[in-house]
Image (cartoon, rainbow, N blue to C red):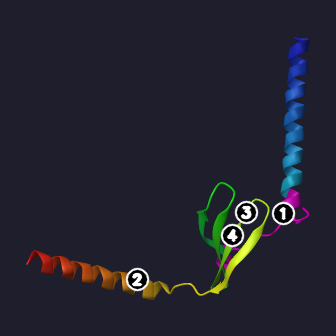
Amino acid sequence: MADLDIYARFIFGLIFVLGLIGAFAWAARRFGLLPGAVRMAVKGNRRLSIVEVAGIDAKRRMVLVRRDDVEHLILLGSDSETVIERGITPPDAVTFAASERSQAANMSQNQQSETS
């Protein structure tokens, strides 16, 4: 019976300590007390996003980053970062969709002319 009491006190103590750690971590994040922590903007106000990531090999990858409607191509390695191209203007979504539609129409016309 005494062993059961010791185990119960141990488990309750462990739960209490883990709860305190969680509460302190939440408070530190909430009030910005963590050094080096970055606060994320609200979804509607984000200025920075990752457009695409392509793996080159096991240690390197190319990342296309968009900031304020300007894209930057960056090569990330295990111990270095290199900007490959700056100030890339992203393709206009409307122009891109229109060109896809015209290509699809041209392909369907070509297929119709081949069958006739």
Tag 4: amino acid: Leu
Q: Residue at x 91, y 20 (%)?
A: 6
Which stretch did the figure color magenta?
A: 27-48
Q: Mark 3 and mark 4: span between their CA atoms?
A: 7 Å
Q: Is residue 74 visible?
A: yes
- Residue 31 lies left or right of residue 46; in this view the side is right
Query: Could you say whether the residue bearing mark 1 is in a helix, strand or loop?
Result: helix
Label 4: few (<14), some (14–19) or many (≥20) C-alpha neighbours in 10 Å: some
Q: Residue at x 44, y 84 (%)?
A: 96
Q: Are marks 3 and 4 in contact (CB under 8 Å)?
A: yes
The residue at which mark 4 appears reads as 75
The residue at which mark 3 appears reads as 77
Q: Mark 2 and mark 1: span between their CA atoms?
A: 42 Å
Q: Mark 4 and mark 2: span between their CA atoms?
A: 29 Å
- Of the residues under marks 4 and 2, which one precedes in the sequence? 4
The residue at which mark 2 appears reads as 97
- On residue 30, which mark appears? 1
- Of the residues under marks 1 and 4, which one precedes in the sequence? 1
Q: Which quadrant holds residue 28?
A: bottom right
